[in-house]
Amino acid sequence: LGRVPVAVRLRATWFSGKMRPMEYRVAQLEALGRFLDEKKQDILEATAADMGRVRGGLGTGGPHAEFTEILLCKNELHETLNNLSRWMKDKHVDKNLVTQLDSAFIRKDPYGVVLIIAPWNYPIYIILVPLIGAIAAGNCVIVKPSEMTKNSERLVAEALPSYLDNDCFAVVTAGVQETTRLLENKFDYIFFTGSPSVGRIVMAAAAKHLTPVTLELGGKNPCYVSDTCDVQNVARRVAWGRFYNAGQTCIAPEYVLCSVEMREKLLPALHKAITDFYGPKPQESPDFGRMVGDKHFQRVQTLLRSGRAVIGGQTDEKDRYIAPTVLVDVQPSDPIMQEEIFGPVLPIVTVANVDEAIDFINSRERPLVVYAFSSDDKVVNQVLERTSSGGFCGNDTLMHVTLTSLPFGGIGNSGMGMQHGKFTFDTFTHHRGCLHRGMGREALIALRYPPYSQQKLGLVRAAAGRVGPWWLVVAPRSRLWGERG
Ligand SMILES: *[C@@H]1O[C@H](CO)[C@@H](O)[C@H](O)[C@H]1NC(C)=O
Ligand SMILES: *[C@@H]1O[C@H](CO)[C@@H](O)[C@H](O)[C@H]1NC(C)=O
């Protein structure tokens, strides 16, 4: 780990063991809490400026950002502080006959020096949630915020180090090239949130050092709407999930699957929901965001060529504004159905029934979340049982992410590993299997030593007949490992 000076500093701290005591971890977590309290206004302004949520004055980066960037982080922090002593404790486990008098336990060891790479779409939240777990688990942490969101990046780089112990913690600002070099260092764990394509690069770099990874990636999250449900409620819940943060949310519903009949009912309901939320001119709404950058704006604008816009469709390049848009007549092969949209555009794809919807979902990469709406529980359960995805939410969107009791993470193309609450702590914890034995009782143990006589073997067989584990304990090593000769 010699290339980046901060990495050298953190490695030295790791060997010193400074971050292991619980009191130390708690103090650092409490400092994170102070960062959230004291810098709240700065955080809201930075994220609002980055995500174009600000419309003259403070506008609303406002309640929007406060919920995700501040409240959800505090929620994680409280949960962690309340439970840390329990999570950290050695877990004593079942023993076999020969270890009855010994001590067998799982030690919750930190990994060491870990790297957290965050994306731009929730510039504080997606850094802090893994950071809380990494500190709680006793690691030294290097954080790399996204270079796309300059205001948040600066805030994190300048303010966070004044709260945390810099022996154990560092912020590295880096673009693509510097990040590539950063990844050449040997870390003990890498936690990456971002796109599947960059996830592959990170995992390949990690493979060189056999470094374990968590990859929180995106995907195209399907949202099945059955023929029986309260259409207006569904429309509000889907529109909220899709247009929150102008669609730049990894768990947003990416497209709706429903019958032609439901589509005809859903369209006016979606129109009403969008107007209720953002008024007749969403561009003037303080609650509707902008595309994070020009490149991103152009990419989403190009995607609008798929299908036909029946709601929205307007764009304004100077303002990086894309109206809340609903598309129909979208073909599964259209570009908008190939890549993650990550913008305020909702295509509706029609299917004949729930079976066809399930086939459609299963013919594609596994998404981060599957949504299903129906007033019939059987339909929701059918979608749950016959599909595979990182998470699932029935009858609503996004809300599963707010529970720290649920693991959050992807599967297949949407990632690997999990976070939130204790799951983040466990992600950054090596579960070290430990056995402390007494030095006595040698006569009992002698059975396992060569030379092996028929008499010994007989004893072993008799014992194994009753208590399986004996066999393993006394079996010659060569036979245990299946070696020859
Ligand atoms: C964390 O602690 C709270 C009480 O402070 C408790 O209700 C909750 O179940 C705990 N969570 C875990 C995962 O242990
Ligand atoms: C979905 O919502 C409907 C209407 O409130 C309800 O009848 C149904 O039980 C819900 N389904 C699930 C799986 O909770």
Image: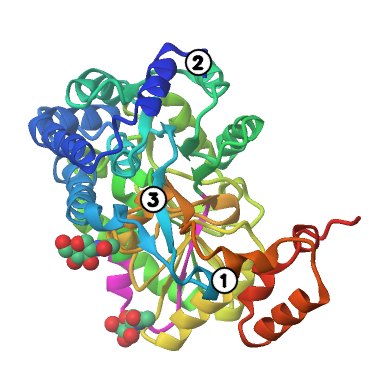
Q: Amino acid at mark 2?
A: Glu
Q: Earlier in the sequence, mark 1 or mark 2?
A: 2
Q: Nearer the viewer, residue 182 or 453?
A: 453
- Residue highlighted by disc 2: 178
Badge 1 element: loop
**Residue 225, x across and y down, in percent:** 44, 73
Q: Tell which residue pokes out farthest to the right in this image.
A: 485
Q: How is the image coloured?
A: rainbow
Q: Amino acid at mark 1?
A: Thr
Which residue occupies 49% across, 56% down? 439
Asked whether residue 85 is drawn in magenta, I would say: no
Asked whether residue 232 is drawn in magenta, I would say: yes
Query: Where in the image, quadrant-wise, is ligand 2 located?
Result: bottom left
Q: Residues within 10 Å of mark 1 (few under 14, many from 20)?
A: some
Position of residue 106 relative to residue 263, above or below, is above
Q: Residues within 10 Å of mark 2 (few under 14, many from 20)?
A: few
| Stretch in magenta | 219-236
Residue 158, quarter of the rendered image: top left
**Residue 322, x across and y down, in percent:** 37, 39
Q: The C terminus lies in which quarter of the figure?
A: bottom right
- Residue highlighted by disc 1: 387
